[in-house]
Amino acid sequence: MNNEEILIKKIAKQDEEAFRVLYENTSNKVFKYIYGLVNNKETAEDIMVETYIQVWRSAKNFKGMSKVMTWIFGIARNISMSEIKKQNYYNFDDNENLNNKFTVTPQQFQLTAQVEIDEIMQIALNKLSVKHREVLDLIFIHEMSYEDIAEILCIPINTVKTRIFYAKEKLREILNEMGVSKDAFF
């Protein structure tokens, strides 16, 4: 049993100190994940609160069938997706407003510093659909396994692999449209 599992068992018994430790150990990753989905700081903060309220209330129901972080990410995802649908943050088929907002020429890109490169990547990621941005975030930022991602997203592992493939392809297309060579990031 790892440390997070021990903490969840204590939280199930209403141990506030265990909850504080779990929050301190996990909240930064969870916030980054949520923010990557909703792309709004205030909304992400609200979802964080809801997520950890749910963790507190549901700890007694945790069966250990998955990793604790996978379980928490699943809770965060469900709340985030509900909020996205409610607020209609993104049009999943057409990011036209976002696509037309930013353009970067190849010459500008070659002159940028690392900070600007990071900004370009963030712009490109924001042009992806939520499902593609989410899967890339889970695999590359949070370094989750295909199995954990499949569990969080409630999809088969092969669908995870396919989604990652198409997300990377779409990201390459977006970067190419921005004038960034495919070798710059991949």
Image (cartoon, grey):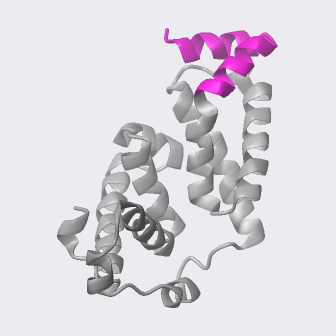
> Relative to residue 171, is residue 96 depicted above or below?
below
> Relative to residue 40, is residue 103 depicted above or below?
below
> Relative to residue 171, is residue 179 depicted above or below?
below
Which residue occupies 65% across, 26% down? 24
| Residue 7, quarter of picture | top right
User: Residue 176 in the image: x percent, y percent?
Assistant: 28, 81
| Residue 56, quarter of picture | top right
Total count of labels: 0
Task: From the viewer's perspective, tell me whether residue 148 is left or right of residue 43.
Answer: left
Stretch in magenta:
1-25
User: Residue 149 in the image: x percent, y percent?
Assistant: 44, 44
Which residue occupies 42% across, 72% down? 124
Magenta segment, prevailing SS (helix, strand or loop): helix
Asked whether residue 145 is drawn in magenta, I would say no
Task: From the viewer's perspective, tell me whether residue 109 is left or right of residue 84.
Answer: left
Task: From the viewer's perspective, tell me whether residue 159 is left or right of residue 100.
Answer: left
User: Residue 178 in the image: x percent, y percent?
Assistant: 35, 83
Q: Quadrant of the C terminus?
A: bottom left
Asked whether residue 5 is drawn in magenta, I would say yes
Which residue is at the front of the view, 148 or 105? 105
User: Residue 185 in the image: x percent, y percent?
Assistant: 26, 63
| Residue 115, quarter of picture | bottom left
Which residue is at the front of the view, 7 or 161? 7
Which residue occupies 57% across, 15% down? 5
